[in-house]
Amino acid sequence: MTAHPTALDIASAVDMPDLIGRLSPTAATPLYLQLQIRLRSAIVQHVLPPGAALPAERLLAEAFDVSRITVRKAMEGLVAENLIVRRRGMGAFVLQRMEKSFSSLSSFSQDMAARGRRPGSHWLNRSEGIVSPEEAMALGLSPGEIVCRFQRLRFADDNLVALEFTCVPMFCLGSIDVVEDSLYAALEKTGHRPVRALQRLRAVALTPDQAESLKVKAGAPGLFIERRSFLADGRSCELNRSYYRGDGYDII
């Protein structure tokens, strides 16, 4: 008996028609669109899981008995839908997307760990100084109070997903040096971990500086999330503003 192929054991494009469905040359739907629809369905249903490598265009064309132009057009449609990504010299891969839940208060590291992903950070700036008028208003602080500011890039399994700016009142940390990899771990240690938060989000076009940091083109779609977190006594303890790459994050 021949075992039915799965996305995880595909060695060549030969298995793809059996895995995702064959094309119909007599159907009214163009062949490129049929292939795009089948690939999209396989990706959405995780028949082709996140990170899976797709066979080369030439091999897919042979497997489905269509032209390479047909395959290329189908693939371009999936790239435009942010379902696959092309990597120079390596081929095409199913895009690995993350999900952000607003149903509970958790740190980025906790979000990633809960999804079986490996969180990572690259610090761009760590500093302390007098609170700005905008920060004072958002955090309910008095003029002259000291705050800690953090700017970093956030990664999931070495994939860059977000640019993050955070401002925390100094009384919550005592010293900026207590923050290592996780800000929430440091707040937990000092007894100032937030218990609730107000969050808002909106779609944005990334500015040239933001796009450069996130390794995308200026004007690329992004997701802006602002969070104000509070202690049990009602005091504000965190102002977080993050810009997520639009091609790698979903809200649930």
Image (spheres, helix red, strand yellow):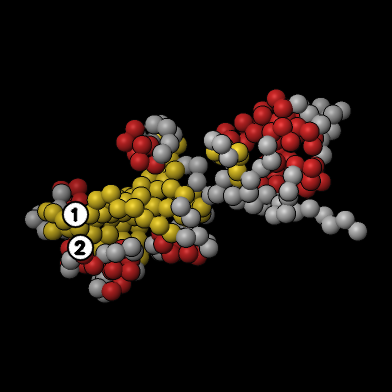
Image location of residue 83, percent across then percent down = 59, 41
Image coordinates for residue 210, horizontal then vertical, percent: 34, 39
Based on the displayed image, in which of its 4 quarters is residue 178 positioned? bottom left
**Mark 1 and mark 2: span between their CA atoms?**
8 Å
Circle 1 packing at 10 Å, graded few (<14), some (14-19), many (20+), is: few
Q: Amino acid at mark 1?
A: Ser
Q: Residue furthest left?
A: 144
Of the image marks 1 and 2, the number of the one nearer the N terminus: 1
Residue 33: where, in percent of width, then height? 72, 31
SS at badge 2: helix
Query: Number of callouts in the render?
Result: 2
Query: As drawn, is 213 to the left or to the right of 246?
Result: left
Residue at position x 69%, y 41% in the image = 55
Residue 168 in which image quadrant: bottom left
Closer to us: 109 or 146: 109
Relative placement, left or right, of 103 versus 200 is right
Tell me the crowding category of disc 2: few under 14, some 14 to 19, or many 20 or more residues within 10 angstroms, Cα based. Answer: some
Q: Is residue 92 left or right of residue 139?
A: right
- Marks 1 and 2 in Cβ contact (< 8 Å): yes
Q: Quadrant of the N terminus?
A: bottom right
User: Is residue 185 positioned above or below 218 on the image?
Assistant: below
Q: Which mark is residue 234?
A: none
Against 94, residue 73 (above or below) is above
Q: Which residue is mark 1?
A: 127
Determine whether the residue tagged by mark 1 lies in a helix, strand or loop.
strand
Instruction: Please tell me which residue lies in front, 106 or 143.
Output: 106
Q: Whole-percent x and y of residue 228?
A: 31, 57
| Residue type, numbered disc 2 | Ile
Q: To which residue does mark 2 refer?
A: 176
Residue at (61%, 45%) from the top-left corner? 94
Residue drawn at (81%, 27%) of the image:
28
User: In the rendered view, would you say 66 is above or below 152?
Assistant: above
